[in-house]
Image (cartoon, rainbow, N blue to C red):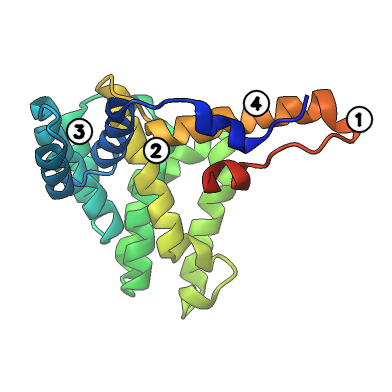
Amino acid sequence: MDVDPRHYEQIAIKDSDIHNIVLSYLVHNCYGETLESFVACSGMPEPADYIEDMEKRKGIVRCTLEGNALKAVELTEQVACDLLENNKDLHFDLLSLHFADLVCAKKCTEALEFAQQKLTPFGKEKKYVEKLEDFMALLAYEEPEKSPMFHLLGLEYRQHVADKLNRAILAHTNLPSYTAIERLIQQTTVVRQSLNQDHGKDGIPLFSLKDFLKG
């Protein structure tokens, strides 16, 4: 069965569905001001319960991105007291960010002391050993940003940790950890892969995710 993206033009979509998708994205990413403007323009009821939560998460994400990982840990424990205790991977990521910041600031003695107190205990579990060794290796370089482990110091890695933290807090507060648009794309990808498996071998051209997004 060939799937033509133009068939979707015949399906009516409610404005409320579109609004909820946009709302989900704004709440997830803590775009408070944009959310307020969108609610005012669309006539949707304001999700008052989310506003305070967004501001707290926004502060935590900002700390993570701006080199204040320990403050992010402190704020996270206030919002979700047992989150980091139960999510050791995330706790390790945040502590290791602080270690990396100390190394970049040439505070090597302080970084080593911090590692011994906070990071070394993670070395008792095998899954942390390799990553712990990578972070510790940064101490051996006068210019760690030029070392083979430079990616651990970059904004992309920091953003990755911040995203994980944001999703974890959302899940902890019983909110969706993925936006509605992310779920739609995930579901579309699964359907496309399934169709490819069923019909691709017969040489039938199927629509791509790029076609879906272009409409």
Q: Do the CB atoms of the residues marked 4 and 3 lie less than 8 Å apart? A: no
User: Where residue 125 sits: x, y (%)?
Assistant: 54, 33
Distance, label 4 to label 2, CA atoms, is 31 Å
Residue displayed at 11% across by 35% down: 51
Q: Disc count in the image? A: 4
Query: Circle 2 is placed at which residue position?
Result: 90
Q: Which mark is residue 99?
A: none
Give the amino acid at mark 3.
Glu
Distance, label 4 to label 3, CA atoms, is 39 Å
Which circle's residue, 1 or 3, is located before the other in the chain? 3
Q: Nearer the viewer, residue 193 or 199?
A: 199
> In front of the other: label 4 or label 3?
4
Q: Is residue 7 above or below residue 157?
A: above
Q: Which mark is residue 202?
A: 1
Give the amino acid at mark 1.
Asp
Crowding at mark 3 (Cα within 10 Å: few <14, some 14-19, many 20+): some
Query: Circle 4 is placed at which residue position?
Result: 191
Distance, label 1 to label 2, CA atoms, is 45 Å
Describe residue 45's horizontal placement relative to residue 139 as left or right.
left
> In front of the other: label 1 or label 3?
1
